[in-house]
Image: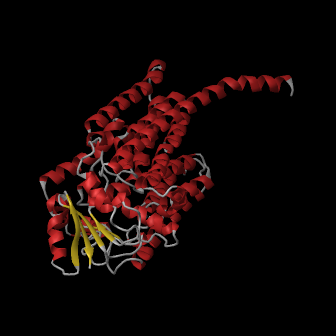
Amino acid sequence: MAFAERRKAFSDLPAAFVAGRFYFLLLLLMSAYVAVIMWLLAFRLNHYLDGFDLAFYQQATWNTLNGRFLEVSGTDFSRSLLGTDVMLVYALLAPFYALWQSPLMLLLVETVVVALGALPVFWLARERLQSQWAGLGIALLYLLLLSVQNGNLYELRERPFAMSFLLFAFYYYEKNGFSQFITFSVLALMCRPENGLVLIMLALYGWLKHRQQGKGWRYIASPALLGAIWFGVAVYLIIPANAAAGTIALGENYPGGSPQATLFNAITDPVKGLSALIPTDKVLTDKLLYIPCLLLPFLFLPLGSPTVLLMALPSLALNLLSTRSTQWNAFDYHYQGSIVPWLVTATIFTLEKIKYNLRLTRFLKEKTVPLLLAVALVVTLAVNIAGPNKFKQLIKEQPQWADGKALLAQIPNDAPLAITNTWAPLVPPRQGLWLFKRMTLYSMHPEKDAQYIFAWKRGDGGKEMDLVKEVLADPAWKIQAEQGEFMLLKRN
């Protein structure tokens, strides 16, 4: 090696060392996130704080592993996840589930994927703001967001997966990494069909922002075509082919029976349509506060980069058109998964504008971004502490749980079972599993094909016992055992 080459190699070592140090710090942050979230998830699972949805999606993965692709039993209108929403990501979890057949394995994969979303955030912020510390700060902001943490903690969901995949897709879109962009876009599409609309908006963003910058047309045409084709195929071909005629999963959450119908009604008959969308003053207030609450942890900085926010519009519209209050809750549940990536990236772009485009003194240019980041982190921590934090749900083990466990032990592992909501994730997966509650989203007759029913006297606010009485009116059913607050029914 020539002297000049050796000198250059040695001169690069400090930069490599610094970069390695920041990657190490980022790894520590992501590891801490995974450790804390997994501890909370394990606690929730073992203290009966999760619900039937976790068992439902675990069943789809377990069935896929056993040759029954995304098969589920808990809904009246479909025997497949392909008939609810096309959520292929649960099939991708099957190889991981094969290593350890526990809901905790599925939750671990989800948590690791969410934590990895900090990587593209770090890369994008570091490059745009020319600062390793800024990259690390915004990555920390992402991991501290209550919408990220609570979405991750809400049982097992596909939206948190999509959140991370969309962050990777956007980073490679900006870096002209076409194959990586397509890979992560496809992964996002495998989470939910509406991410096809996100890709269409990304194509519009690409056209608006990059038409003067020589961006190849494939970066505009490919997301538009990919998004439109997948959304159309999923919503208008796959779901109808796998569901009862006219059934739209979660359609009851929209006044018109679907988001499209709700929007159409609001346009064609504004008085009737809007009154259905906003039936009370509280709903109006909550919906008006929804977007400001989303922006609050970011100090409203995303508003400085409106073109990036185009990609958030489809999910924002779906949430605001819904009558289900959980969808316009900015801090809890999982419905912000396809919105968070664009709030984070828009924040980075706005900080870049502040640093390089505003006419500031050199001192202000150096200090403004760190100051804004510090304030954003403080506000995010304050929201985290004051908001619907899952730490507040920690409870001690209850003595009566031993009674329920004793009754569960009497049920064969493969027996068709209808079960109370919060105990469903603790039973081994099986081909026949239903939520013991009359619910249009699941089943209006969960006892129809079940061989056993496991009921909790306080389940569903005490209403579960009314359903038990209905079932026992049928002579085909009898009480096999009763212990404390729990009952086990068996079909004769």
Front residue of this view, candidates 423 and 40:
423
| Spot occupied by residue 39 in the image (x, y as percentages of width and height) | 40, 42
Q: How is the image coloured?
A: secondary structure
Tell which residue pokes out farthest to the right in this image: 2
| Spot occupied by residue 349 in the image (x, y as percentages of width and height) | 46, 39
Residue 465 drawn above or below residue 130: below
Residue 78 drawn above or below residue 299: below
Q: Is residue 255 visible?
A: no
Residue 174 in the figure: left or right of residue 301: right
What residue do we see at 57% from left, 48% from top? 172
| Spot occupied by residue 352 in the image (x, y as percentages of width and height) | 48, 34
What residue do we see at 39% from left, 37% from top? 144
Q: Check the picture and name the quadrant holding the C terminus.
A: bottom left
Front residue of this view, candidates 47 and 294:
47
What residue do we see at 27% from left, 57% from top? 404
Residue 131 drawn above or below residue 256: above
